[in-house]
Image: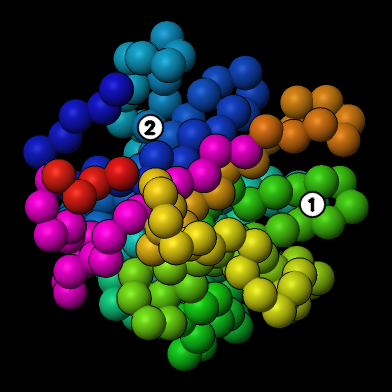
């Protein structure tokens, strides 16, 4: 769907003002880049750079209380930071509490779409305590303003994790949930069977991919 001469992953697709947008991970470019679909799901064109100057990783965006909020982390780091803007293509301001998550490998790195149910705002994070993406934790955001941020775990254990055998034997690290109708949801998840090698997103061999 999208080809660039640099690393692409974590395609975060969303709709706004009748247009489809995507924010893929482009940490090699040290940017958070916004793309728009001319003919969804094809025809992606680069719109603009939202953030620059760091190897931003697995960025997640959400519209809440009339503002845009962008959560991002960095490879090998156990922190998460948030930025906000009045408009999608406007200027992004770092939150004064950044990093909002510190020294927490089970809480920092995004694990998929942020969900606004209308009553609760839920953020999902990869559990990288022992290795990359072993499970997914859920956190309820209880304060999100230009000056305040707070969240709490939904439960004490991961909501997704490896089951010991099959396609998700060793771990799970992504959740993308969508509400089809009131109270009806569909979610896409992923998993892996064998351990990651040391390093950033490298598999032992292509045959080990799920």
Q: Is residue 6 left or right of residue 85?
A: left
In the displayed structure, 162 sits above or below 177; it is below
Q: Is residue 42 left or right of residue 164?
A: left
**Tag shown at residue 35:** 2
Q: Residue at x 48, y 30 (%)?
A: 21
Expressed as whole percent of the image width and height from the top left, the position of residue 56 reads 33, 63
Give the structural element (helix, strand or loop) at label 1: loop
In the displayed structure, 139 sits above or below 106; it is above
Expressed as whole percent of the image width and height from the top left, the position of residue 3 reads 19, 29
Q: Quadrant of the N terminus?
A: top left
Is residue 126 a member of the stretch shown in magenta? no
Nearer the observer, 94 or 3: 3
Nearer the observer, 101 or 127: 127
Q: Quadrant of the C terminus?
A: top left
Quote the CA–CA distance across marks 1 and 2.
23 Å
Nearer the observer, 88 or 62: 62
In this view, which residue lies farthest toward the top? 39
Q: Give the mark nearest the N terminus, 1 or 2.
A: 2
Dominant secondary structure of the residues highlighted in magenta in the image: loop
Q: On the image, which quarter does residue 46 sit in?
A: top left
Expressed as whole percent of the image width and height from the top left, the position of residue 125 reads 54, 66
Give the structural element (helix, strand or loop) at label 2: strand
Q: Residue at x 29, y 77 (%)?
A: 76
Q: Residue at x 33, y 50 (%)?
A: 25
Expressed as whole percent of the image width and height from the top left, the position of residue 108 reads 49, 74
Q: Callout 1: few (<14), some (14-19), or many (20+) C-alpha neighbours within 10 Å?
A: few
Q: Is residue 120 left or right of residue 85?
A: right
Q: Residue at x 45, y 46 (%)?
A: 190
Magenta residues (range): 187-206
Q: Is residue 23 visible?
A: no
Task: Name the residue beneath numbered marker 1.
Answer: 65
**Tag shown at residue 164:** none
């Amino acid at each position: 769907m999208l080809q660039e001469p640099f690393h692409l992953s974590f395609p975060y697709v969303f709709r706004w003002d009748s247009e489809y947008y995507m924010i893929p991970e482009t940490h090699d470019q040290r940017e958070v880049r916004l793309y728009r679909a001319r003919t969804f799901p094809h025809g992606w064109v680069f719109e603009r750079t939202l953030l620059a100057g760091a190897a931003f990783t697995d960025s997640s965006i959400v519209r809440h209380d009339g503002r845009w909020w962008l959560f991002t982390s960095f490879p090998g780091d156990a922190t998460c930071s948030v930025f906000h803007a009045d408009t999608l293509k406007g200027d992004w301001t770092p939150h004064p509490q950044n990093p909002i998550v510190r020294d927490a490998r089970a809480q920092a790195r995004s694990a998929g779409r942020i969900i606004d149910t209308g009553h609760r705002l839920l953020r999902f994070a990869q559990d990288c305590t022992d290795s990359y993406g072993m499970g997914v934790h859920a956190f309820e955001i209880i304060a999100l303003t230009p000056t305040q941020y707070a969240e709490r775990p939904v439960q004490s254990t991961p909501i997704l994790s490896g089951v010991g055998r099959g396609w998700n034997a060793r771990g799970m690290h992504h959740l993308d949930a969508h509400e089809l109708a009131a109270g009806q949801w569909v979610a896409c998840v992923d998993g892996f069977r064998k351990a990651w090698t040391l390093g950033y997103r490298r598999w032992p061999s292509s045959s080990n991919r799920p």
